[in-house]
Amino acid sequence: MSLKFLSKTSLLITASSMLMGCSDEDKVACVVDDMDAVATAMVDGSPWAANGGMWAYAGSAMQVSLESAVSLTLGIRGTIDAAGEPVAELMESGAFPIVVDLGDSDGHGGVTDLRNGIDAYASTQPGGSGSLTIAGLNDGVLTACFEYVAANDEGVVMEVRDGKVRIGD
């Protein structure tokens, strides 16, 4: 065996051992590095990238709108965290990371598909679920990770996985 293989194996075992002793809250990790776009994700198994967008406070919530060249827009809204605290207040106080359930009234993940007319999908529809982890806010630049399953009125779902965003206000 090579030294490189043994080194990687040792690192993996050490990391796994450390995670076993952590609570689920401690395991939440959102790393947004080396992005060539405002946001990236896998949408129904295909790579997706935003070519524009914005984030803003919406009352006590936070909202992100992301546009792409492939006529799929993503919208994400965080209203309250798992403890029931308003997301905007948590962000303003610097209480990161902030984890939001996107499958109920705590938050929302949406996809608007404009490729063949207009079709809207939401994580709050039956069959939907997901999460948003807001990692930080520095000089007006929001960093976050997200993933969700969004359903339309007919029960058709779109999966958004491995989503990452770094966007200024």
Image: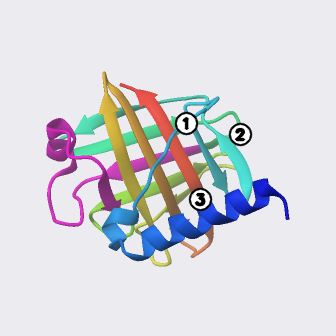
Look at the numbered discs 3 and 1 and tell me whether their residues touch, using CB distance below 8 Å: no
Q: What crowding class fits label 1: few (fewer than 14 Cα within 10 Å), some (14-19), or many (20 or more)?
A: few
- The answer to whether residue 159 is visible is no
User: What are the residue bounds of the magenta stretch?
Assistant: 73-100
Q: What crowding class fits label 2: few (fewer than 14 Cα within 10 Å), some (14-19), or many (20 or more)?
A: few
State the residue position of label 1.
Answer: 33
**Separation of disc 3 and disc 1 at Cα?**
17 Å
- The answer to whether residue 10 is visible is yes
> Mark 3 or mark 1: which comes first in sequence?
1
- Tell me which residue sits at (58%, 70%) in the image: 13
Look at label 2 and name its amino acid: Val
Look at label 1 and name its amino acid: Asp
- Establish if 1 lies above or below 21: above
**Separation of disc 3 and disc 2 at Cα?**
17 Å
- Tell me which residue sits at (51%, 40%) in the image: 32
Of labels 2 and 1, the one closer to you: 1
Q: Nearer the viewer, residue 3 or 143?
A: 3
Q: Position of residue 114 (x, y in %)?
A: 64, 45
Q: Position of residue 37 (x, y in %)?
A: 61, 30
Q: Is residue 65 left or right of residue 25?
A: right
State the residue position of label 2.
Answer: 70
Look at the numbered discs 3 and 2 and tell me whether their residues touch, using CB distance below 8 Å: no
Q: Is residue 79 part of the magenta span, yes or no?
A: yes
Q: Position of residue 74 (x, y in %)?
A: 52, 46
**Separation of disc 2 and disc 1 at Cα?**
23 Å
State the residue position of label 3.
Answer: 161
View extreme (right): residue: 1
Picture quadrant of residue 100: bottom left
Look at label 3 and name its amino acid: Arg
- Establish if 127 lies above or below 61: below
- Tell me which residue sits at (15%, 63%) in the image: 84
- Tell me which residue sits at (20%, 46%) in the image: 95
